Amino acid sequence: MEKQKKLLILGGITHMIDVVETAKSMGLYTIVTDNNETSPAKRHADQAFDISTADIDALEEMARQEQIDGVLTAFDDINTWNAQLLTERLGLPFYATKEHLEISASKDRFKEFCQHFNVPVIEQYEKNDDVPVDYPVIVKPVDSYASKGITVCQDQAELVEAVEKARRFSRQGRVLVERFIDTNHGVEMYYTLQNGEVILSAVTDRFVHNQGHQSPPLPVATIYPSSHLAEFVLKHDSNIRKMLKGMGLQNGLVLIQSLYEGGNFYIYEMGYRLSGEQHYQVVKRQTDVNLLEMMIDFAIGKDISQYDLSNFDDGFMRYPSCNLSVLLGPGIIHEIKGLKEILELPSVISWVPTREVGDEISVTGSYAQMLGRFNIVCQTVEELNGTIREINQLLEVISENGNDMVLARYLAEEKVT
């Protein structure tokens, strides 16, 4: 009888519950570790450790003792680095090299690749530019994540302060200053890499809420498929495929974000990991191909060519879908109403909470303001719009002061409010 393979999962946040349950459904023995004794995913795993995901020495010792067959993490940039280093020490598969992660994590290095392959990017101001800065601008750490350390600036005084803030959030102490494109509309591209082949899995419209002149916009909805799908494929898909191959990527999932203004796409960021939106759930409903299972199989050394993606290499989605984010304003969460009724809606395929009753929310301009995300798949656009309206009517997040904490609601086919 074949020995049951063991998968070590780095990080036990709520998002990782789906990873644990999927791995168990594939017949794997699951072990979750991080330094939080009460991490939600640990309750679902076969075994758990309270070893920090940053303690590579302790993780290596534990992994050898437990005879781990594979290591996986998802949704988190820092743990992706930790997983890469750990698998390198253990001689286990990992989809990315250190060089790959450096390219995807550093906004300036990614931007250099875009420019080399004629992929459009946002104009930036260099330190020694003689040209006066045309405000507003957006200031970013070159290597932050989840919108941390980002500020929109209207004048020189705000710029000086924002640069110092961005440096504090940057491991390298470096920042980018770019023209701020004041739009609530972006386009996201999801690519899948499989044994050196590049597949365009989805192109989506991303809508954001701008909560203040200094805070970066935060997402409220991602709609599948994008209204700009054909335009994007015609203009930029070929060059982005060449770029990803030029980076040397062979396997894994890539998210590329852009802003859309005046008929132009402006590419600004890349993620090389499973996305926090868990877009693989929507792709599974559309194609019957489970990208999370593919990455789990890769982690334990299985041949992933069994996952046939050849018929879905155009970003097209048969069924209108949405990843609906719930952004919160300041306050302490006292009650969440309507969640049970929403989860009973047949088109709501998942809900990943990131906040709960008792949590205090501050206006940080980061994903820490997000209550959670719904994934929705429908048969028609009309059904999708109706489901979103129903969720908006049912969901209430009440503060201790009795106020509605929901900061913005995406109104189907209308502007974000």
Image (spheres, rainbow, N blue to C red):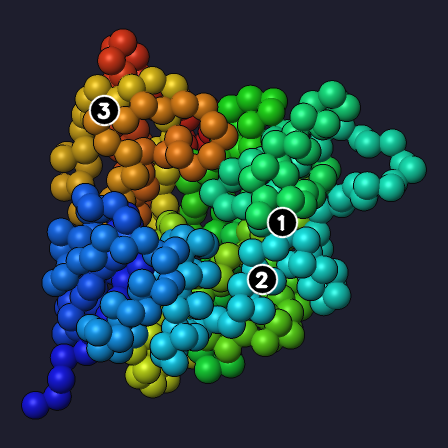
Residue found at the very far right of the displayed protein: 130
The percent position of residue 305, horizontal first and vertical second, equals: 37, 84
Q: Secondary structure at mark 3?
A: loop
Q: Amino acid at mark 2?
A: Glu
Residue to which mark 2 is pinned: 102
Q: Is residue 40 visible?
A: yes
312 to the left or right of 68: right
Q: Nearer the viewer, residue 316 or 63?
A: 63
Q: Nearer the viewer, residue 382 or 391?
A: 391
> Where residue 65 sits in the image (x, y, percent)?
21, 74
Quadrant of res 181: top right
Amino acid type, label 1: Gln
Q: Secondary structure at mark 1?
A: loop
Q: Which residue is mark 3?
A: 358
Viewer-side residue, 236 vs 217:
217
Q: Give x and y (percent) for residue 62.
A: 25, 68
Q: Quadrant of the N terminus?
A: bottom left
Q: Which image quarter: residue 238? A: bottom right
Mark 2, Cα crowd under 10 Å, few <14 / some 14-19 / many 20+, is some
User: Which numbered marker is on residue 172?
Assistant: 1
Which of the two discs, 3 and 2, labels the residue nearer the N terminus?
2
Could you tell me how far apart the alpha carbons at marks 1 and 3 are, in whole angstroms?
35 Å
Give neighbour class at mark 3: few <14, some 14-19, many 20+ (Cα, 10 Å): few
Residue placed at 92% from the left, 37% from the top? 130
| Residue at the image point whose x is 12% and y is 63% from the top | 46
**Would residue 282 appear left or right of 246 to someone viewing this image?**
left
Dot 2 falls on a residue whose secondary structure is helix
Q: Amino acid at mark 3?
A: Gly
